[in-house]
Structure formats: structure tokens, C-alpha cells
Amino acid sequence: MSDDIPGYLHDDAALAPSPVTKDDLDKLLASVLFGPEDQAALRTAGEVLGGQVEQVLDVWYGFVGSHPHLLAYFSTPSGEPIGEYLDRVRARFGRWIIDTCTRTYDEQWLAYQQEIALRHTREKKNATDGVDSTPYIPLRYLIAFIYPITATIRPFLAANGHDEAEVEAMFQAWFKAVTLQIALWSQPYAGTAW
Ligand code: HEM
């Protein structure tokens, strides 16, 4: 389905299993109050967002591009933005929007979650795209990004004419799914404190 996206490995059988267990995941899902109604709302969100991925990415890339301290992570150590890096990550980011809404949160998903986490750390940043950029994304920015990645999605969720209650349900489910993932991605940063 997405074999044509360079570096996208969700369905790769060779992906290392996550150190995060299904039990860890279930407890985190409970901690963000994620239930079956959220899963259903995310499925609808996937349909709504499916036709707007490029526009969502335009907003997010506009946000990163207008903040030099964030653009630095897509740039060379001397501060030159790397166009190919931005483009290649953008394609995987677009796929992630759909995955967040449509994937079953199982062991395979956990394995790719861990891969994405590592790609923000010293262990794997830059390796997928073979670039010379900054060595890692500080954890504090991953956490802070929960807000813009959530707040900016609302108008897109409202774009298909769903009523206010449906939009709100999709929005809450998205917020929970993003918070959950950043909690998962904190694992390699936190080590034994996770
Ligand atoms: C809510 C927080 C965040 C989300 C949901 C998110 C999402 C993603 C996704 C989906 C990818 C592609 C994963 C893949 O390879 O399939 C990615 C990679 C990347 N993100 Fe983030 N991200 C977040 C925070 C940040 C922040 C704060 C920065 C800093 C500007 C950042 C910079 C990057 C970079 C540079 C890559 C490429 C890493 C590599 O070399 O492979 N991300 N992110």
C-alpha cells in the first residue's frame, strides 16, 4: 500500500519488536481514557482527513518552517535547510496521519511506533534519509508539539460537514491518539525511568 514511500516500514516483518508490551499499551490507552468510541471516531477522522493530508501537512510544515529553532532539526549543522529531508519526512508524516486513524494498535504498530521514536533520537535520526543534520530532537519539543498537532487538526475534521458533536468526538480521539504516541515515543529517551 505504501511501499513507494521511502523509509516507511510499518509493515516490514523484519522490524524489531518494541520493548513496549501490549500490556504497557493497554495501560497507556486506559490512562488517556481511550475507548471503543474513540476508535470509531478515529475511523471517521481517517475518512475526513484522507482527502486533506497535503493541506494538513502544509499547515504543519508552515509552522515548523516559520520557527528557526524547529527548522534547525531539518537542517545541516550549519543551519541550511535540507530540502530532500523535508520532502521525504513529509511523505512519511502524511502516511502517519492516516495510520493514526486507521491502524489497529497491535504489536506491529508498536514496533513501528518504536522505530519512529528512535528516528527522533541519536540512535536513528538522519539514518533513514542518509542526511547530515542535527543529531536528535529534544524530548521537550516532542511533548510541546502535542498542542499544535492537535489544535490545528480541528478545522480539517470539521471540513466534511459532520455535526458539532461528531467533530468534537473526532477531535478528542485525535488528541488522545497523539498524546498516547508521544508517551510511547518517550520510551527511548526515558530508558529505565519509562
Ligand atoms: C507531536 C509531536 C510529533 C509528531 C507526531 C511527529 C511525527 C513524526 C513522524 C510521523 C515522522 C516520520 C516517521 C517515519 O519515519 O515514518 C517524524 C519524523 C521526524 N520528525 Fe517528528 N514528530 C513530532 C515532533 C517533532 C518535533 C518537535 C520535531 C522538531 C522539529 C520533529 C522533527 C522530525 C524530524 C527531523 C524527523 C525525521 C527523523 C529522521 O531522520 O528519520 N518532530 N515525526
Image (cartoon, rainbow, N blue to C red):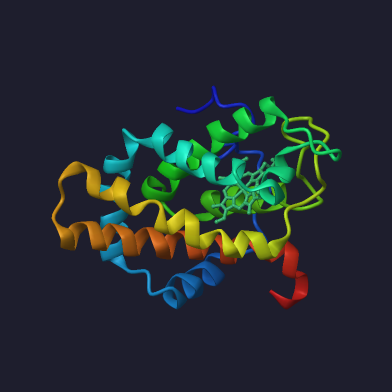
Is 162 left, or right, of 56 in this rendering?
Answer: left
Dividing the image into 4 quarters, which one contains the N terminus?
top left
Q: Kindly identify the residue that appears in the image at 45 percent across and 70 percent down.
A: 29
**Which residue appears at 33% of the width and 36% of the height?**
50
Image coords of residue 42 (percent x, y) = 32, 53
Residue 156 at x, y percent in the picture: 31, 45
Q: Quadrant of residue 21?
A: bottom right
For residue 2, side relative to residue 13 (left or right): left
At horizontal 27% and vertical 41% (from top left) the residue drawn is 47
User: For residue 133, which quarter of the picture?
Assistant: top right
Q: Position of residue 110 (x, y in %)?
A: 56, 55
Percent x, y of residue 120: 70, 50
Within the image, what quadrant is residue 175 found in?
bottom left
Residue toward you, 76 or 106? 76
Residue ID at (53%, 71%): 23
Tag count: 0
Q: Relative to 36, say whether 104 is above or below.
A: above
Q: Residue furthest top?
A: 4
Q: Is residue 159 shown above or below 42?
A: above
